[in-house]
């Protein structure tokens, strides 16, 4: 900093530093906001699960439907076998 700065230059520097400080404070506040971070992770997990279980058209993936049907058949067979 030079001693020969005009008041306008000093005010400009102060405003710039305030903006930088505000950005830093906002970043720190975001890091400390555990609830918002948890909600973001939940949203991300839901989107990942949806992408893995549905086709781009939004329908259930056929291989998952077949696996679920197979599981139902196996469970039904075990229940039937245990009751005999």
Image (cartoon, rainbow, N blue to C red):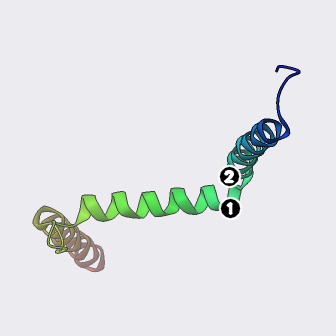
* Quadrant in the picture for residue 9: top right
Q: Which residue lies under the disc numbered 1? A: 35
Query: In the drawing, does residue 32 fall left or right of residue 4?
Result: left
Q: Residue at x 16, y 72 (%)?
A: 69
Q: Secondary structure at mark 1?
A: helix
**Left or right of 50, for residue 30:** right
Q: Residue furthest top?
A: 2
Residue 55, by quadrant, is bottom left
Residue 30 is tagged as 2
Query: Residue 64: percent from the left, percent from the top?
Result: 18, 64
Q: Quadrant of residue 49?
A: bottom left
Task: Provide residue 43's location: percent of width, then percent of height.
Answer: 47, 63
Could you say which is closer to the camera, residue 29 or residue 25?
Answer: 25
Residue at the (28%, 76%) spot, across then down? 79
* Place of residue 31 in the rendered image (x, y in percent of width and height, measured from the top left): 69, 47
35 vs 24: above or below: below
Give the residue displayed 89% in from the left and 21% down from the top.
3
State the separation of the CA atoms marked 1 and 2: 10 Å
Provide the secondary structure element on which disc 2 rests: helix
Q: Nearer the viewer, residue 26 or 20?
A: 20
Please tell me whether residue 37 is drawn above or below residue 8 in the rendered image: below
Q: Residues within 10 Å of mark 1 (few under 14, many from 20)?
A: few
Q: Decide which of 71, 4 is in the foreground and name it.
A: 4
Asked whether 72 or 64 is in front, the reply is 64
> Considering only order in the chain, which callout, 2 or 1, is on the residue closer to the N terminus?
2
How far across and how far down the image is residue 75, in percent? Answer: 26, 71
Image side of residue 50 versus residue 13, left or right: left
Q: Please tell me whether mark 1 or mark 2 is closer to you in this view.
A: 2
In the picture shown, does residue 2 fall above or below 78?
above
């Amino acid at each position: 900093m030079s001693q020969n700065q005009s008041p306008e230059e000093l005010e400009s520097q102060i405003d710039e530093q305030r903006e930088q400080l505000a950005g830093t404070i906002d970043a720190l506040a975001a890091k400390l906001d555990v609830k918002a971070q948890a909600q973001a992770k939940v949203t991300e997990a839901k989107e990942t699960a949806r992408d893995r279980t549905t086709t781009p058209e939004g329908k259930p993936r056929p291989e998952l439907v077949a696996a679920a049907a197979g599981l139902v058949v196996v469970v039904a067979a075990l229940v039937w076998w245990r009751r005999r």
